Image (cartoon, rainbow, N blue to C red):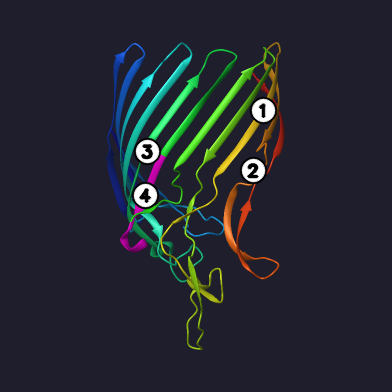
Amino acid sequence: IHQSMFLVRNKFYSNTQPRLSLRYLMHENWSLKAAYTQMNKYINLLSNSGIGLPTDLWLPSTDRIKPQASQQWALGVFNVPAKGYEASVELYYKTMKNLIEYKEGATFFSEGESWEDKIEMGNGRAYGAEFFIKKTKGKTTGWIGYTLAWSWRKFENLNFGKAFPYRYDRRHDISIAITHTIDEQFDIGAVWVYGTGNAVSLPIEQYPMLEFPSMPQNNYYTEYDYNNVQYYDGRNGFRMPAYHRLDLSFNMHKKLKKATRTWSIGIYNVYNRKNPYYLYFGYDDQGRKRLTQISLFPIIPSFSYSLTF
């Protein structure tokens, strides 16, 4: 049992966080595990749901913004099928309260309000399954992990009160890591990762804006287009392209009298995948409006030297 406390603006929060973990050995190579966790978080992540440069902010709980609270249940089966091998399957379900999201039309750059006035509070839930296989013996070692997951948010005043996917809801997440030892001096490694793209909000229609002399300016309607009003059918209803890349490394080791010297050569993003960082609406050479992707970190070689004592 864990007790957490937080004091801000003369507001005192105190929460009990029980945690329970059970393990049952069904057979020499099989075990069943169950766990329950209750947690509270006093630092809240606030993300924009639209396109454009990501503005993820970590904001503290205040006298107006309650700490986030969650409960998680997990059930897993673990197996050692052979010497040097491990495998597991785990299911989980998580509920969350006091989550924060921007109000409709609000952004970090909106004027005239504190950040506490720009947000809505709601609930969420996440669930899924995790699969894992690991090899620890032999010249070739490594592991494969796969997660199938859902993460939903529900706010009374957002998305017509209907649940919508969280921005970082990642349906499929795959990681593969392999290391091959050639001899005592040389080894090579490879890591490949894949993840479903982030969920974002995109307009499905737009209409010309009628301007009147007495009409006040509204940053929401003019954030990306000064001449049109954009209509959104749902929150986070579109997916950015998937993220994936391959990294390779080659290591040369040499034992010294009192240390081990390692030279490493690596290549990040071997096949130069243009993974999306963010999207924005721009115009091509013919003046036509286009959704444009900005990518970071192309293929990057690296070189390092280390001493281990």
Query: What numbered label is drawn on residue 249?
Result: 1
Q: Is residue 111 visible?
A: no
Residue range highlighted in magenta: 149-162
Task: Please identify the quadrant where the C terminus is shown.
Answer: top right
Q: Earlier in the sequence, mark 3 or mark 4?
A: 3
Is residue 92 inside the magenta stretch? no
Which residue corresponds to mark 4? Answer: 152
Asked whether 136 or 103 is in front, the reply is 136
Spatial CA span between label 4 and label 1: 37 Å
Horizontal side of residue 59 vs 5, given as left or right: right
Q: Earlier in the sequence, mark 2 or mark 1?
A: 1
Horizontal side of residue 35 vs 225, given as left or right: left
Q: Residues within 10 Å of mark 1 (few under 14, many from 20)?
A: some
Q: Amino acid at mark 4?
A: Trp
Which residue corresponds to mark 3? Answer: 128
Q: In the image, residue 70 lies at what x, y percent? A: 31, 43
Q: Earlier in the sequence, mark 3 or mark 2?
A: 3
Which residue corresponds to mark 2? Answer: 273
Q: What is the quadrant of residue 71 in the picture?
A: top left
Q: Earlier in the sequence, mark 4 or mark 1?
A: 4
**Location of residue 182 with respect to 5 vertically, above or below:** above
Is residue 150 inside the magenta stretch? yes
Q: In the image, residue 240 lies at what x, y percent? A: 53, 52
Proximity of marks 2 and 4: CB atoms separated by less than 8 Å: no
Horizontal side of residue 11 vs 43, given as left or right: left
Spatial CA span between label 2 and label 4: 29 Å
Spatial CA span between label 2 and label 1: 17 Å
Spatial CA span between label 3 and label 4: 12 Å
Q: Amino acid at mark 2?
A: Arg
Residue in view at x 66 percent, y 71 percent: 287
